[in-house]
Amino acid sequence: MSAQVNSVAKFKIFIAGFAAFAMFFGSGNLVFPLMLGSQSPSNWLYSSIGLAITGVFVPFLGLVAMTCLKGSQDAFFRWLGKVGGWIIPFLILMLIGPFGVIPRCIAVGYGAWQSFSEQTPLWIFALVCVSIIWLATFSNAKIVDIIGKYFTPFKLGALALVIGGSLYFALISKQTISSDINSVSPATSFKVSFFEGYHTMDLMAALFFGVSLVTYFKSKDNESIPFKPTLGAMAIGMSLLFVVYMALVYLGAAYSGQISHLPATQMLPEIASIALGETSDYLISFTLVVSCLTTAVALTSVSVDFICEKISFLRTKRQLTLMFCIATTFVIALTGFTGIMAFMAPILIWLYPFIIFLAVLNIIVHFYKKIAAAKLKTDAKKAA
């Protein structure tokens, strides 16, 4: 790996790694771990493992597949034929884009905002959010640089304060994890968390974020991709995601008695308020809103780029496409977190396993061809 790493500046790898974390860690990533920990506090470790598989390992497989295919979505979906290879990616993009995850990010941010400003109407909050998203994605600049250099430092710092402070308080106050007699079994906790990981939709996002990350490492003069540094950056992002998931599931379990009755979007604000005091309301809201907006910006960027690439008459109309995504996001966000999840859940049940299968298939085929080519080359040398 050293030769490839030397050809790619180490700070560039870390910027991309932090950008990967910031892209993935959005609305569902803040909500679902806490919810899972609060639902099964005595089995929080099993919940963490189940969530880590579908919420961290599986999305990493998607990133590996996209790296193997040099960031080509067409190659990833080539098994579906021309029509299927257009429809399925477009459906996924709409779900992780303006019809699903982007408005969900706004809905989660709004839940945090309400912790100190209950009077703010959802439509005003959503309007401010889509305005910020529009400003951040207006130019066609490299989204990895924008997120890695500007959004991520604020996001990581705020998350470290809120999550770290809450963990510290739980430990020094000897916050005990309840062993509810009605708690489900470890196997059930694992199973529920495993399938709840679908709702993060990070595997689907990986198919689009992977394009941005791979493109980030491509040099202008060479189409080849430094494979190991690219995967290294992705591994950094996924490792950060794993650590934060574990911390959030534990927090959900430790504070289950105080938060289990709350809506999912208000759990972290309540935990932080208990641990850090009511004066932390501004910090909590800032953390959640910035986390959600970072993912929303990244998803809006890849949504616009994908639509412009796939629909021929929009290829030179990026601003029009951006306005369509912004307007759709605003309208869907007004349905709230519960309404958005009710719409997406039935689709994810069948679509997510199918995408997992395609990711694994693409990785296996890539390495099989690589091994076969190496063997053929070795045989040719022996014959000579």
Image (cartoon, helix red, strand yellow):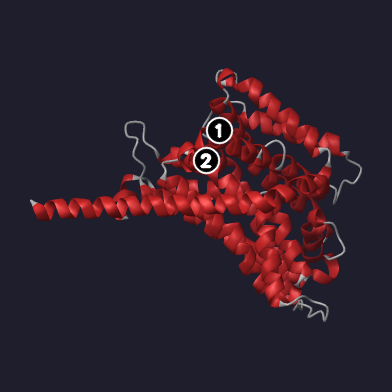
Q: Dot 2: few (<14), some (14–19), or many (≥20) neighbours within 10 Å? A: some
Q: SS at mark 1?
A: helix
Residue 123 screen position, x and y as percent: 85, 35
Residue at the left extreme, as displayed: 384
Q: Is 273 above or below relative to 115?
A: below
For the residues labelled 1 and 2, say whether their Cβ atoms are less than 8 Å apart.
Answer: yes
Locate the N terminus and report the quarter of the image it occupies: bottom left
Residue 126 screen position, x and y as percent: 79, 36
Q: Which residue is mark 2?
A: 80
Total numbered labels placed on residues in the image:
2
Residue under the image location 76 percent in, 62 percent down = 35
Residue under the image location 48 percent in, 36 percent down = 74
Between 98 and 89, the residue placed more toward the observer is 89
Instruction: Judge from the rendering whether residue 227 lies leftward or rightward of residue 300; answer left or right.
Output: left
Instruction: Give the Cα distance between marks 1 and 2.
Output: 7 Å
Question: What mark, if any, has residue 126 been given in the picture?
Answer: none
Amino acid at the residue labelled 2:
Leu
Q: Quadrant of residue 33?
A: bottom right
Residue under the image location 71 percent in, 71 percent down = 189
Residue 317 screen position, x and y as percent: 60, 18
Q: Quadrant of residue 91?
A: top right
Tell me, yes or no, if residue 240 can be seen here: no
Q: Is 148 above or below relative to 165?
A: above
Amino acid at the residue labelled 1:
Val
Q: Which residue is mark 1?
A: 83
Tell me, yes or no, if residue 295 can be seen here: yes
Q: SS at mark 2?
A: helix
Residue under the image location 74 percent in, 31 percent down = 328
